[in-house]
Image: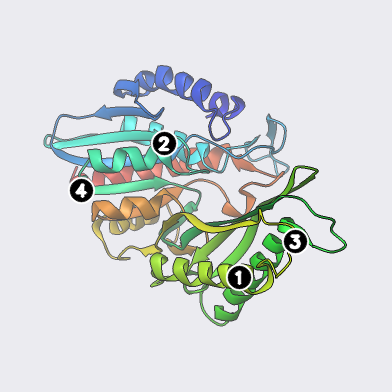
Amino acid sequence: MIRLVEIPGVTGDESKACEYLARALPAYGWDDARIDAVGNVIAGRGNGDREIILMGHIDTVAGGPSFRLEEAPDGRGEILWGRGSVDARGPLCAFAVAGGAAVVPDGWRLIFIAAVGEEGDSRGARHVIPLYSPKACVIGEPSGTSGITIGYRGHLRIQLSAGDGGAHRSGDAGPATACLLAASDVLREIQRRDNAAKPVIERPSGAVITMEGGEESTGRTGMVDLDVRLPLGADPEVWSAELLEIANEHFRCRHVPHGNEINTKRVFSAQCVSSIPAHVSDKNNRLATALRGAIREAGFAPRLLVKGGTADFNLAAAWQCPVAAYGPGDSKLDHTDKERVSVSEYLTAASILKNALEMFMGV
């Protein structure tokens, strides 16, 4: 884990980290380690046709604390700092260790997948979904040693863009302003639909990912990229259509050229770039039951979690098999400058997962 966290690998630039991991996996007991057509690291163990997939992601967001390994303040082991230590190379490496050490009986096969692009368009997970039909899937995301995540909210990514042939902002606020106001209308509607009394899995939220605007003599541009989190039960197609209509209504009502309008090059666009529904697994499925049993054996009280983010967990729902997310680390540290994980927690999580896999396979 320590070496992998040290290697940079932001989304879209994961190749060095993937090459290192593919070389390292055989030493942990994995066979046929390779890099597939989209950049995922794939490996396997066992020769059966009943597959269990262990899928984490190897890409990270940018930034984070400087890489270092230091003694814990309480003197109990070491703390690994660095981008990806929690989200999600810590869980991914726990998968490599646990799956490589687990006894795999006849009839079973473990598949390890270090997916690329999870922090972007999930191209790695989307590539492998049609290729396998597993009996269970564990997703590598931080839950702590005693946590089992069984649900994530869904996601819409909406892009609003506009352009024109140029004008003075004193008389025409322009495309960047139009996009900001349309985005404001969309975000207000999401807030209107929210209910703070409900659990996070049943609440929507919206946030701006990025904004751009330009003013040139040849024309002006604007763009707002929105991240919308969908509650359980929300139909992505319905929500997308409704929110895009709100944006388009803003453009139609407030920014259509009038009569003697000089600026005839105005273009407005509202589109949904990607979507995925929320998903919650049965808390009593065989995989969750095995994880609870292994956590209890390790001396902890199991906790079932649902999260407000979205993960490759949602895509794995297409396999229609037991799915759970598990891994060391505190998810509150995701994408922060305090991202770090206890080495002892990492080792404990790997041990728990190994035992849970063996329970599931009937070892």
Q: Mark 4 points at which residue?
A: 135
Mark 4 or mark 1: name the one nearer the start of the chain. Answer: 4
Mark 4 or mark 3: name the one nearer the start of the chain. Answer: 4
Label 4 crowd bin: few (<14), some (14–19), many (20+), radius 10 Å: some
Cβ–Cβ under 8 Å for marks 4 and 3: no
Q: Mark 4 or mark 3, which is nearer to you?
A: 3
Q: Which of 178 and 26 is in front in this view?
A: 178
Give me the residue at 20% from left, 48% from top.
135
Mark 2–mark 4 Cα distance, whole angstroms, equals 19 Å
- Dot 2 lies on which element? strand
Query: What mark, if any, has residue 177 been given in the picture?
Result: 3
Cβ–Cβ under 8 Å for marks 3 and 1: no
Amino acid type of the residue tagged 2 in the rendering: Ala
Mark 2 or mark 3: name the one nearer the start of the chain. Answer: 2
Q: Which of 205 and 24 is in front in this view?
A: 205
Q: Which of 224 and 250 is in front in this view?
A: 250
Q: Position of residue 81 (x, y in %)?
A: 66, 36
Cβ–Cβ under 8 Å for marks 4 and 1: no
Q: Name the residue under label 1.
A: 252
Q: Mark 2 or mark 3, which is nearer to you?
A: 3
Left or right, residue 136 beside residue 144: left
Q: Mark 3 or mark 1, which is nearer to you?
A: 1
